[in-house]
Structure formats: C-alpha cells, structure tokens
Image (cartoon, grey):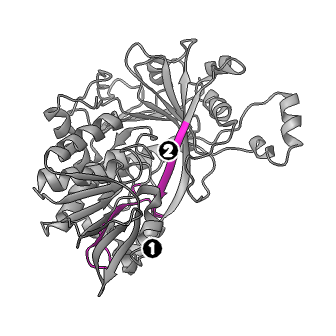
Amino acid sequence: MPTADVVICGAGIAGIAAAYQLTVRHGLSGVVMIDDQPPLSVTSDKSTECYRNWWPGPGDTMVRFMNRSIDLLEELAAESGNRFVMNRNGYAYLTADPARAAELERGAREVSKLGAGELRIHRGRTDDPPYPEEHFDELEPGLTGADLVLDRDRILRRFPFIAPDVVAMLHTRRCGWLSAQQLGMYLLEQAREHGLRQIHGRVAEIVVSGGRVEAVRLDSGETIATRRFVNAAGPLAPSLSRLAGVELPLLNELHGKVTFDDHLGILPRDLPLMIWTDPVSLTWNEEEREQLAQDPELSWLLEPMPAGVHFRPEGGAGSRMHLLLWTYHLEPVEPVFPPRFDPFYPEVVLRGLIRMVPALAEYLGRMRRPYVDGGYYCKTRENRPLIGPTPVEGNYLLCGLSGYGIMACQAAAELLGAHLVAADLPDYAGELLLGRYEDPAYLRKVEAMTSGQL
C-alpha cells in the first residue's frame, strides 16, 4: 500500500497553496494532492480574482489575516517577477444616499482602526489631505489605507461616467486583483519541483480507526496510507467531511460573473473595482413592466434589488473586456457542476449597473453575446474560514474560504502548515478553528458580525 505524509483533497487555489506551503516552505517530501478535475478549474478561476485588506469587525482577525496574506502574495510577486500580474488598483465603494455615506464613514473609521491603514477624508476644503497619485496596473506596496471622498465634484472629475447624484466614494487602497490561474500555476510548479505527487481521482472513503485518520481510499480502489488528511475541497468540503464523520457549518451560494465586451468604449480602463453600495430598482418601460408583472416567476424583477452590483476592467491596456458581477439570489444551494445561471443574468446585471453608470443604457438591446461563468461561495454564516484540526485526529480543514480564496490562500496555507508541523500559531488562529463554535464568547461575537462580502 502506498503511503503519504499528507494527502490533500482539492486542486483549487487552497489545495495548491497548501501543497506549496508543505513542500516548499516546510520541506515535506511525501505530499499527495487528489482531484478528479484539472487544477484551478472548478471555482478558483471563476472569481473576480481580487484581493483586499478592508474587512469589518468586530475584532481585527480578518484584517490581520488578510494583511498577512497580502504580505505573502507581494513576496511571491517579487520573487516571480510578478508573473501573476498583481496590481494595487483598489476598490471604489460609491453611494448616492447621504445616510449610506455616513455609514461608509463610520465603517471606514472602524476598519482603519483595526489595522487596514490610514483613513484620509476629502470634503472639498482647502485643508483636505493630498489625494494619492494612481498608477494603474502596477503594484505599489506603499499605497495603503483608504480615501473617503465626500466631495461630489472630486468624484465626478475622477470618474465622470458615474451617476451624477453620487455623494460619496470610499476608495480602499491595499486592494486590487491578479491572475488566479498564473498564481496557482506558479505555486503548483514550485510544489512539483519539491516532490508533490498529483493523483487524478475522487476520494471515496476516509478510513478512520480509533478516532484518527489511517488512510484514504479512492474511487479507483487505490488506498493510500496516511495519518494527515487535508480537506481543501471547496464547495464539496461539507460532503467530503462527512466521510470522516465530521459535520461542517458550511453553506454554498452561487455567484456568477459576466465577461462583457465594451465595444462602444463607454468605460475607461484605468479603474479600481467599482461597487455601487445602494439597493437598485431596475428601470423598465411600460410594456416590459406589464409583462413582468404578469409572470409570477419574473415579477420579482420589479422589486428593489440588493446592493453590491460591481465591475472591473479585465485584460491588458488593449482589451475592451470588463467583468460584471451581482449576486441577487443569496439563498443556499446544493452545488451542481457545471453551475446553472439565469438565462437573463447578463441583462439583469447590466440593468443594475446602469444605476451606477447611466451611459451603459446604450447597451440595452445592443449587448454582444456575453460569456457567463461562476462558481460557489462555500462559507460559514459569519464568512470566516475553517482552518486547522477537527475532533478526528489527523483530519484537517482548509475550507470555507467563500469568495476570497484567492486573496486568503497564502495566509490560510501558512496557518494550515503551522498546525500540521506543530509550529507557532498566530494569535488569531483560534477564531478560524472549527472548535470556535463551542466557545460562548465567540458565538456572542458572531451575532454582531457582518459578512464583509460584496
């Protein structure tokens, strides 16, 4: 029977980052990674591929966790010649609601105090702080904190295509995006060079004896003896965990994205991730409203829709493509592959974005056929990951990374590695364990948490 020091189930960005951490950083020679799909193909390449250190409390766990992960991503960018084209383009949260502007300011002051960086407030006065110069598609590690702009004229000078009733913009700076495929392949190549063994297959059984992991059996019938098993199976983590007799407090949400061809040239390229933070009511003509009202399955499109419609440029300077995203169905679902999306999803997202960018109305009836894909956000109710051991000895979790697996992968894999080799743990490690749900103090904290999700 073959043996392995560690078996990792899942070849998404979490599993690959774990393999890199264990082989390259810790020098383990007997690491096996199992998946029945090609690397990075199920969920990891379906996201916005963005990162941010801007996370709400209570407590600074997520800010410190993400700051650490971004530190490690920047180190990888430096050593690889920025092979995965990491930038510091930022996120821009916009609102036309004065009450929401006040909420943005309150929240920004809180997150800044948690360690996300200095908050600079711009009110259109002579004593305003300098507005940082932007160099788009470049990685500027010194650009941190956030700029809260409460001056409409300044917002519209910078982004003249935004709805003219905008009243506030929070531009967070230690944020941007990268190529998830290139990051993942760089990590995978390094892990292979350090002895990682990949197996194409599906885990059919986790053999547990005397309360500890003893082996993993594949659907091919092959059995691998191991005393350390890592569940990095993304949306399939809950069902995989049941093979070890461990229930996980995870749910799956379906999130889609639209790759949109801006052939009319309405949107500039030098942009942050642009996010509209107000609820949206879609605009329809009278005939459309009558048709929707008469259809019980579509009449909800006449109701106010959730906040959070967003977009960003995709590709290099010569590209016309943008990614458009909006999750307006938040109910948990059972994952199916490939995921299925509403046939009208691209039009709904476009109509939502018209509230933020009115000129996009030019595309109603003229949008070239967009490409739609996406994946599942596998998440805990408070949207914090599960990293570390379980009650079954030798059974480890690296899951619940929701829609932030790309940005969190380095700190998450580092923390998992520390658990596996009994190294020193960061002091936030306890709040990312499965066992946190047995702590009454943590459960009280959960009640005050927001998800921090777009």
Q: Which mark is residue 102?
A: 2
Residue farthest toward the bottom in the current orientation of the protein: 210
Q: Residue at x 50, y 35 (%)?
A: 275
Q: Residue 4 at what x, y percent from top left?
A: 20, 65
Q: Residues within 10 Å of mark 2 (few under 14, many from 20)?
A: few
Q: Quadrant of the N terminus?
A: bottom left
CA–CA distance between discs 1 and 2?
45 Å
Between 166 and 290, the residue placed more toward the observer is: 290
Q: In the image, is residue 177 above or below residue 330?
A: above
Disc 1 designates what residue? 242
Q: Is residue 421 left or right of residue 92?
A: left
- The residue depicted at 42 percent of the width and 74 percent of the height is 443
When the figure is inspected, residue 126 is found, relative to residue 209, above or below; the finding is above
Residue type pointed to by label 2: Ala
The residues colored magenta run 373-401
Residue 53 seen in render:
no
Of residue 449 and residue 154, the one placed in the foreground of this image is 449
Q: Amino acid at mark 1?
A: Arg
Helix, strand or loop at label 1? It is helix
**Residue 90 painted magenta:** no
Left or right placement of residue 381 versus residue 355 in this view: left
Q: Are marks 1 and 2 in contact (CB under 8 Å)?
A: no
| Pick the front one: 398 or 395 | 395
Q: Compare residues 384 and 413 and report the one nearer the observer.
A: 413
Kindly report which numbered mark, 1 or 2, lies closer to the viewer in this rendering.
Answer: 1
Secondary structure under badge 2?
A: helix
Q: Residue 217 lies in what quarter of the image?
A: bottom left
- Say whether residue 29 is left or right of residue 37: left
